[in-house]
Image (cartoon, rainbow, N blue to C red):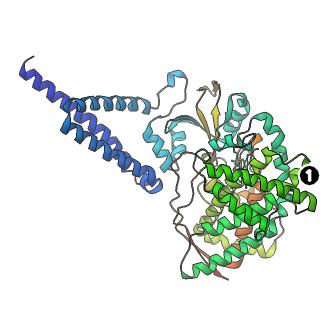
Amino acid sequence: MGAVTLIAMHVVLTIAEIVVFGLAAGSLAIVVSDRSLRRIVPWVWTGLVGALGLFAAAIGFLAATSRSALSVFAAGIGLVIVAAFLRARPGFWRKRGLPPGSMSLISSLKALAHRDFYANRANRHGPIFKMAQYHHRVICVVGLERGHRLLRDRAASIAASPLPFTQEIAGGFLRYMDAETHRVYAPLFRRALAKSVVAAAAPTTRAAADRELQRLAADSSAGAVAPGPFLERIVFESFMRVLFGMEIGTESYDRFASAYQALADQPLSSPLGEAARAAVTSLRAMLLEQSERLRTNSGPLCTLSELGRADPSMPDDVCLDNIVFVLRLSTANVESLLHWLLDTVGRHPAWVGPMRDELATDRDGGADLFDRVIAETLRLGQSEYLFRTITEDFEFEGFRFPRGWQMRVCVWESHRDASTFTEPAQFCPERFGERDFSRSEYSPFGWGQHACNGVALTSMICRAVLEGLVSGFEVEVTGGEPAEHGPRHWNHWRPNAALRLRLAAR
Ligand code: HEM
């Protein structure tokens, strides 16, 4: 081979490498320059900047040390680019009967940072589309009627998408239980979390709300404060009373709260550590003791006592573990909704006056403005999705749903259907007074056999806080926008961590 040919090959190779590295770095740079990604999921953004830095360092190192290794590296990156390009085409896997939609990592990251991602994809591809959530393959379904029909008609080919902690729970966590076990325990828990049980804990919850709001007002006299710790205490105290009949200031409450801390500190996305596992064992023992106390002393009406009344052989290990994990998971749901409610009050202060008027005129009414404000906040803020795993291939509305894929019924996007909710992006609590919405139009608490059994409890706590807030204080809320998201696709959107509250007694 002549010298000229060698030089030409060398030049072509170098140009090809520059193109490959340029394309890879350019794609990463485009993602990194997404301001929403940086603001909303800063950890993911930092990771990507790190990856970009490492990539540049690897190229520099190889260029300085081994020309041939650099070429091999470029070839590898080139293959990755080609694969990524193919997967990013909406028509990818369409021949296999799958719905349209990009499987690219870039789209996956956009879903974390852009709240309208799923709605935009549905506008582009139709109500059934596919996407990647990191390495998971997911089919998204928009439209509650469609989603519910799918869950009902293909129930035999769909299973729960459990988080790892469920393996640690006797019988599994209610939400992820097998159908046979669920048939036994779901009715028990529905009864044990019924309205009457929850109502018995309302005075404790109101007292906790009043006390914490007073504290918050005192603390915020020097400047607005983050409401999180105050809301946490209200919610925890209320749950302790509803679930276990335990009142703050008692020995059993203090013992339980202190043992519970290790479980509270355990992230539920990873398997339980030793400390959390030990905590569950001692919490279980304490609850058995409490259950006996409630039985012999005819203690206050609560979930634990109601489980025993429904079936004298209860609570067994399945009940005890589930009740502990209901505390661990569902307190977070309610705290989050309370943050959304504060954010709502901050952005729509005009509704505070009407809420006060309603308190003055109709304290015992049925569904009133408070219920409507909570319902509208759930619609716009918190209700997001139902996740399931596809256990065997099936077809639905002309598309193949392959075994092993995840399925996401997009609730938040369905709650913005303009044919059901006029001006869907607007906060308009009155829409819930003007007409009733069916379950296939509005269902923030899920649907079917796994629908939420904490609706009464959620409503009671939210009302206690909202009523205490507007009746007792002038309220100033700042900083909840833009909403934030965690690094996982199943994390929920929440008001910005900069949300601050300032209260002054009226
Ligand atoms: C803002 C508050 C809440 C929201 C938005 C919410 C939402 C939901 C949703 C959407 C589901 C269905 C999940 C699915 O089908 O995959 C669900 C189930 C469930 N929720 Fe809630 N929830 C809330 C509060 C609570 C509270 C306070 C409790 C406990 C007392 C609770 C306990 C449960 C349980 C045990 C299930 C599973 C029920 C079963 O499978 O039988 N939730 N929730």
Residue 231 horizontal side relative to residue 40, left or right: right
Q: Is residue 5 above or below residue 113?
A: above
Residue 143 rendering spot, x and y as whole percentages: 64, 41
Q: Is residue 95 above or below residue 135?
A: above
Can residue 69 be spotted in the picture?
yes
Q: Which residue is at a point 83% across and 56% down the rendered structure image?
A: 289
Front residue of 272/452: it is 272
Residue 358 horizontal side relative to residue 109, left or right: right
Residue 387 rendering spot, x and y as whole percentages: 63, 40
Front residue of 287/145: it is 287
Kind of residue indicated by mark 1? Arg
Q: Which quadrant would the C terminus be assigned to in this image?
A: bottom right
Front residue of 420/148: it is 148
Residue 336 horizontal side relative to residue 155, left or right: left
Q: Which quadrant would the N terminus be assigned to in this image?
A: top left
Q: Which residue is at a point 30% across and 37% down the rendered structure image?
A: 23
The residue that disc 1 covers is 309
